Image (cartoon, coloured by chain):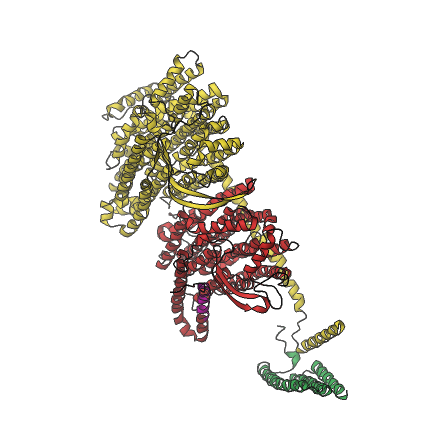
Amino acid sequence: MLVSGLSAILFVMGLWGAFTRKNAIIVLMCLELMLNAANLQFVAAGVYHGDTAGWIYTVFAIAIAAAEVAIGLAILLSVFNQHETIRLDDINLLRN
Amino acid sequence: MGSSYDEVKNALDVPSEFVFIILLPMLAFPLILYLGMKFNGQKFWKENLKEGGLVALPVMAASLVLSLVLIRRFINETSVSDTSTVFSWANFAWFTEGATTEISLYSLNFGLYVDHVTVMLLFVASFLCLLINIFSIGYMNTDEVNDNKNHRFYAEFVLFCSGMLGMVLSDSFLWLFIFWELMGLCSYLLIGFYYDKPSAAYAAKKAFLTTRVGDVFLVIGLAMLWNLFQPYASGGDALAFATVFDHSNLQMLADAGKQGALQLALGFMFIGAVGKSAQFPLHVWLPDAMEGPTPVSALIHAATMVNAGLYLVARMFPIFGDSAMMGEFSDLAFIIALVGGITACMAALIAFVQMDLKKVLAYSTMSQLAYIFTGLGAALWLANSLDWGEYPNKGIVVVAFGAALFHLFNHAMAKGMLFMASGSVIHEMHHAHHDLHHHHHDDDHHDDHGDDHHDDHFDAQSMANMGGLASRLPITATAMFVGSASIIGIPLIGGFWSKEGIIANTWRVAVEHDPRFYIPAFLVLITAGMTGFYMSRMWFMTFAGKPKTEVAEKVHEQTPWIPIPLLVLIPMSLAGIVFASLKSTYFLGYKGYKLGEDGLLEGFLYEMDHIFVNPGTNYLLVLTYIAIFLSMVLGPCAAMALHGGRLDEGQKAKPWMQWAVTLSGKLNDKYSFAGWAEKMSESSFGEALRQRLYFDKYYDMAMMKIVAGFSNLSASFDKNVVDGFAIKTIIEKGGQDSSRIIRSITTGSARDYIMMVAVGTLAIAILLWGVN
Amino acid sequence: MLDDFDVITLILLLFPFLMSIVMLTITGMVSESSRRKLAPVWRMVSLGVSMALFIVASMMFTGQIGGVDWTGIGFNEYEFLYQYEWISSLGITWQVGLDALSFPMVWLTTFLLPVTIIATWDEKKGAVYHPLILLMGATLLGVFVSLDLFMFYIFWELTLIPMFFLILKWGGKDRKYASQKFFIYTFTASVIMLLGLITMYFSMPSNTEIAMDNAGEYTGRTFDLLEITSIAQSVNAGGIWLENLHLIIFAMLMIGFLVKLPAAPFHTWLPDAHVQAPTGGSMLLAGVMLKMGAYGMFRIPATLFPHALEHFQFILMLFGFVSLVYGAIVCLGQTNLKKMVAYSSVSHMGVILLGIASMQPIGWAAALFMMFAHGIISPMLFAVCGAFKHHYHSMEIGAMRGMAKHSPWLATSMMFGWMASLGLPLLAGFVAEFLLLIAYWHEFGWWILGPGLALAITAAYYLWSMQRTIFEGGEETQPPKEMEGKPIPDISDMEKVAMLILAGFTILFGIFPAIALDMMSDWTVTMFQTLFGGA
């Protein structure tokens, strides 16, 4: 129960950060935070139910998170090369 | 009521080898085109083969020989032929609703069919095709305008001949129509032979379109006819003559009460004939068609193709004549006669003022074809309404029908000859003009004149530039003389017999049976006098009097090949009495109807005797005969007085024409009516005649203003309303507007998207929670 | 040697498909400079492939392959049937086969492919053009051979892709607009058709009620057209299949086909697409692609919902009537040669609709023959338009006069094509028109004056345009200014070959229509008997 609450707090912190922060790297970190909140919940649920599936999902999620961070950082680098900024407010290519 | 069918003795199964009559010229078409493209400009092709003229000649000769063999066989062996199917064109199924719902299979076939009408027209077509081929070699190949183009002429020429012969020989209305259209195509191509002249291009289009209007009705008529005869065709060809003419089929049709529908179908088909034979109101194309080379005018627009409409109407005779349909089709017969009467008179009037030699002949053709229509109308009325069983009736019908067809024969021969003679005049005028103006003055520019030959201001076709040619063109003048006499109907010469028959029979119907016929009867009667005038006017303006231009003085006959067909046709036209006295089975009967062993001549003599001697005779008919005779004398005399004149000093025509020239000189001296004639021609009526009674003007206006205007309107409607409003405004603009609204929520800011994802997820979660 | 030729349909379909994919892939992989060298090679390969297809299809026609007598084939009987289970969970099979409805179309497609390539032989279009043409042909073949509704729909939509690119890449000035309009318009209509198909799929009885061979494991229903047909027929024999929905489904399917055909007032995509499309694209578009609409009408709605066809007979006739007459009138008002020809296609497609609406075996056979004849004639018209544009850099009627003088071959081809299209007897188009008139008079009586008027107007616009292009051209009407001083060439040898082939077949099927008409007629008879009874 405690762990679930902790993961919920972590998730809300991540969501809040993703909404409010302007720096893309920090937003990325917030996304990681949310992922890890989910991981925590998986592990906790796994222990609670005595089922290893939750742990296995966590391992997958960590691998995907790693890949996501790599791609995300690569995108950010590429964005910085083109726009010389990573402020999210200045990047609205989809709009134009 | 007697059966309308005499016993059929022995049917001739036409061997399918005779399909070569059609096939040979058809195959010569690609051959000449190919050779022409390959050898164009080479000496051998030009000198020895006459650019295809001598390829076409043996082909046409072979067609004529084969035709003669077929005709001989037909006459010797039988009085009627079977159709012999050559190949099956289309097979299809038909679903009949009704008491017995069933599907039956039908076919449309091509086959050959020979009867008396076929025989006559087959001879006319193949004979004139050959003669005009000979004429063309003289006419086309000696004019440098045509250099290196003649292969196109000969190719289209043989294709046309194939179409004409095919139309005559085919065994069903469908194939008659198919070859009919093939002729129309060739007519279009040949009128447009000098395609770089805008007037020729216009004339070609006009000819095709005007006849096309008729053809549309014809093809709809065929569809109606098929639907009528399909129940009785029992899987065969419902458009074959064998089915349509069959008495038991017609009887069943009559029992089913479908006479009116049949008359409607035949009426629709008649409109096709009106277009093809240039009758009112679809007549406007024929005078313009004179833009084509003269051999084309001679062949297509005088001797053969324009007869197709007559042939089609003559083909309907067995339906009209069948006892099952007795008295049902008198309206249609009257309409046919009426159209003929109106056209005859109108065309003759317009011919009064034409100055172009070929246009006079064109209107004369129109008028004479109209005669035949009137004659056919009367014959069909008689055939439809008289009881064949009673004694003299059969003879009356066959004489009436025979007279109309015999006029077709006479007219084709005479008019073909007249056109060739006019071609000879025009050709020699051209040469004379060329020699006079170009050779004498500037030899250096000789080569340049090939091209602008036709754009010269000198009009070699205008009779205003001719005069006094009788001594300079003896053969041509003789041919014109005989031809004109035959068309006018000078007693004992060709056309006299047939024209007399037509007028008398129309009057007979009017007086004895149907008073409506007084209108066409009266029209054709006064036309007889007008014919005498305008044909004589043409001859005397061209051949009598003093030459009106310097060119006309230099004219002489010099072109080879041209006189040959003229010399052949002169006796043909003169010998009308011989043909008229042939046994009617040879030419002019129909399927067992014949005047015993007598010929058409006996028929006429019997009829004249019947009218003049028989005390019960109506005096109107007697008066008719007198009127005919008078008009045939008065017309030429008036023309002589107005347009005749003596030849130059020292010039002398051949003795058989000299008397006419001298007579015209005397008449002209005495009563020249000069002031009166001028007044007439300056009056508004004269102007209306020169404007061809404004038909062309108003047709053109209707075409340009109404049809073209409406289609332009439709095109812009399609562009601006159907495409513009419906598609562009409603769908495209609507789509764009709605997309603009939706687009405004895509801000492009990543944080907004994260927000949307979160809100969306939350929404889904709540939804799922709510559902569970 | 080989007894079982059934797989040949599959080969006919897959061979050009794979060949074009291979060519496109190779083209995509090589560099810009070698692409230019590839272009003539691909042209040659495409010609070879399409010639091979044509030869195979012709041998199937004559019976040398498979020994099929096409005249004996009745409705719902298929030759060269090949079936393979594909997506069994939904009852989707990979099923191809030929009958007298589809085989003429297949033959026509294989005939037009090499002719199209020959006619546009000299146009420099790069290495992608010819593979795309081949791909176009393959997708069209797919539409005609597939006997599974799912597969049919896939190929139906696939045909849009190569055509879209053909217009977009090699089209005229407004090609972007035209290609998108073409795509969106026909695609939207197809989606309605798809909805109709899906409605039908889910409303038909599942295999718990009726025994089915190819029912899907999950849905219990099938896309197999043969199976659906037999179900529908067994119901239709005594009643109406899907009685509460049959009118709606029929209408939804028909919308897709009417837009494709196209019938007025859904025709406006066609003139734009034709005017902008390159010659080869136009030839295939008019020659085969439009016939997909008519083919579809016969294959699905008419087969499955004969009662709805009867119900909508008069409305269908009105659509055809308006297309025919209105199309002809609009033609007369056009100033652009290619646009005129495009509208004439609308007009002729009206004839097909009238044939379908006539509800006579002969009217149906006339419609089938019109599909076939127009498939030979209209490519010739567009080939002529293409050559015209190629030589004179203008499509305006009247911009160029006296063509007969300097380009006799082009002028002759034009006249031939125009004459064939206006229904001159002894050429293929007349056969269909005449047979149609017979059925039409029987069914609709005096309405026949409309088609009659259209026949006359058709002659008028063709002749008028000929007067102002082929004829005239004396001194006062010279070629356009920009052409002055330059020699005007006639069409090239390859174009001549294409014209001769097209003209030859037009004459062949005009004089001996029975070659193709017999099988169509037999098929429509059995179809009529199956659908509506009768002895």
- Look at the picture and state if B6 lies above or below B90: above
User: Which region of the structure is painted magenta?
Assistant: C6-21
- Look at the picture and state if B727 lies above or below B407: below
State which chain is coloured green. Answer: A
Most foreground residue, B52 or A8: A8
In the rendered image, residue B36 lying in the magenta stretch gets the answer: no
Specify the quadrant of the image occupied by residue B571: top left
Whether residue B693 is visible, yes or no, is no
Q: Find residue B761 and report its horizontal and vertical position in percent.
A: 70, 76
Give the left or right position of residue A15, taking residue C364 as reference: right
State which chain is coloured yellow. Answer: B
In the rendered image, residue C13 lying in the magenta stretch gets the answer: yes
State which chain is coloured red. Answer: C
Q: Find residue B550 and report its horizontal and vertical position in percent.
A: 28, 33
Report the number of discs: 0
Q: Find residue C63 and report its horizontal and vertical position in percent.
A: 40, 57
